[in-house]
Image (cartoon, helix red, strand yellow):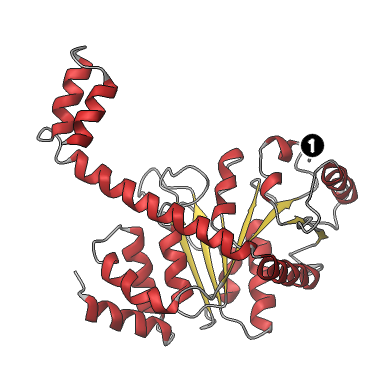
């Protein structure tokens, strides 16, 4: 396990652009390594500068294509871009099912781009449980923009909003009734809507439906009303406008104080998740040897109710 000096050397190498050191740091996160503690201490002075853009939407709307187009646009501006693509978990290997996105291979040899697929490993919300720590590492490594593309899993997808500064909800024509997206519970978390594949028939109907739904929503006097951007990511049409709208949202986040509020909520959730995971680890112990197993046996035998068992476990 790396000590503090080793962790600092690893972080320093990642900040200097060494892709292997960066990949190793992200692997430590994915594997839940005990080495994360000194690593997180080492990244602390360097994090907090990157803009985090979340991309979500139903499967098939073109999230990977939009992500690749954004990477291209930000690289043209001279910005370093990190991509975390959270994939379903393979039932055979436990790893990311799709691997690094085929559509992003154009950027694979660009030293200013880092792309990593992470397995969701059954974690609800479309995000890997390790995503917050991976974001922190990419931020500390000096990336200006970090795109987080999530599994398109429907209602639980709203978790991306707690992780991103700006959340893009991507929809497309030909994916069925666009209003179904509202029922999935993802429209409420959008900072921007992207109607992708806008060169296809039905795109204007999707835009109209979104406008109708936004007209029924309530926004504060100084609130942010999500704009709708029509784009065709495969050809690059509309991406320049999308980048401009993201810049406008970032400016609003800073001027309204919303950025600090969101990052505080993100930090609170991250600390809570780590604390709960550590408590679960300590309370669980080894199977067949832990106090938890003894209490569970009493509950299963009907000798103890689960609330009393939980109280005893915590007290112990």
- Closer to the camera, 241 or 164? 164
User: Residue at point 83% right, 57% down?
Assistant: 198
- Closer to the camera, 33 or 267? 267
Element under disc 1 = loop
Residue 144 drawn above or below residue 285: below
Looking at the image, can residue 148 be seen? no
Q: Position of residue 101 (x, y in %)?
A: 55, 62
Picture mark count:
1
Residue 21 drawn above or below residue 190: below
Q: Position of residue 289 (x, y in %)?
A: 9, 35
Residue 266 drawn above or below residue 246: above
Quarter-of-image position of residue 306: top left
Q: Position of residue 170 (x, y in %)?
A: 71, 53
Label 1, on which residue?
A: 177
Question: Looking at the rendering, in which quadrant would you find the N terminus?
Answer: bottom left
User: Residue at point 80% right, 47% down?
Assistant: 173
Residue at the top extreme, as displayed: 302
- Closer to the camera, 167 or 89? 167
Report the side of 36 relative to 111 (left or right): left
User: Residue at point 78% right, 73% down?
Assistant: 240
Q: Residues within 10 Å of mark 1 (few under 14, many from 20)?
A: few
Question: Looking at the rendering, in which quadrant would you find the C terminus?
Answer: top left
Q: Position of residue 214 (x, y in %)?
A: 82, 46
Residue at the left extreme, as displayed: 289
Quarter-of-image position of residue 313: top left
Looking at the image, can residue 76 be seen? yes
């Amino acid at each position: 396990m790396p000590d503090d000096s080793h962790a600092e050397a690893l972080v320093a190498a990642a900040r200097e652009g060494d892709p292997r050191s960066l990949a190793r740091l992200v692997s430590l996160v994915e594997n839940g390594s005990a080495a994360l503690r000194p690593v997180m201490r080492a990244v602390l002075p360097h994090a907090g500068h990157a803009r985090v853009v979340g991309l979500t939407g139903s499967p098939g709307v073109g999230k990977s294509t939009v992500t690749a187009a954004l990477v291209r646009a930000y690289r043209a501006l001279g910005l370093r871009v990190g991509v975390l693509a959270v994939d379903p978990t393979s039932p055979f290997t436990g790893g990311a099912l799709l691997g690094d996105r085929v559509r992003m291979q154009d950027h694979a040899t660009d030293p200013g781009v880092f792309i990593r697929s992470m397995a969701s490993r059954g974690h609800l919300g479309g995000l890997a449980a390790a995503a917050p720590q991976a974001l922190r590492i990419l931020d500390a490594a000096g990336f200006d923009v970090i795109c987080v593309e999530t599994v398109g899993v429907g209602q639980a997808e709203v978790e991306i909003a707690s992780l991103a500064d700006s959340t893009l909800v991507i929809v497309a024509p030909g994916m069925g009734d666009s209003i179904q997206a509202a029922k999935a519970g993802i429209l409420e978390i959008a900072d921007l809507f992207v109607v992708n594949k806008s060169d296809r028939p039905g795109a204007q109907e999707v835009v109209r439906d979104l406008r109708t739904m936004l007209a029924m929503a309530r926004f504060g006097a100084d609130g942010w009303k999500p704009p709708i951007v029509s784009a065709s990511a495969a050809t690059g049409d509309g991406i320049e406008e999308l980048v401009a709208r993201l810049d406008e949202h970032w400016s609003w986040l800073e001027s309204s104080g919303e950025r600090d509020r969101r990052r505080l909520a993100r930090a609170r959730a991250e600390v809570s998740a780590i604390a709960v995971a550590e408590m679960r680890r300590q309370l669980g112990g080894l199977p067949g040897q832990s106090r938890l197993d003894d209490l569970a046996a009493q509950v299963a035998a009907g000798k103890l109710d689960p609330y009393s068992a939980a109280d005893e476990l915590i007290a112990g």
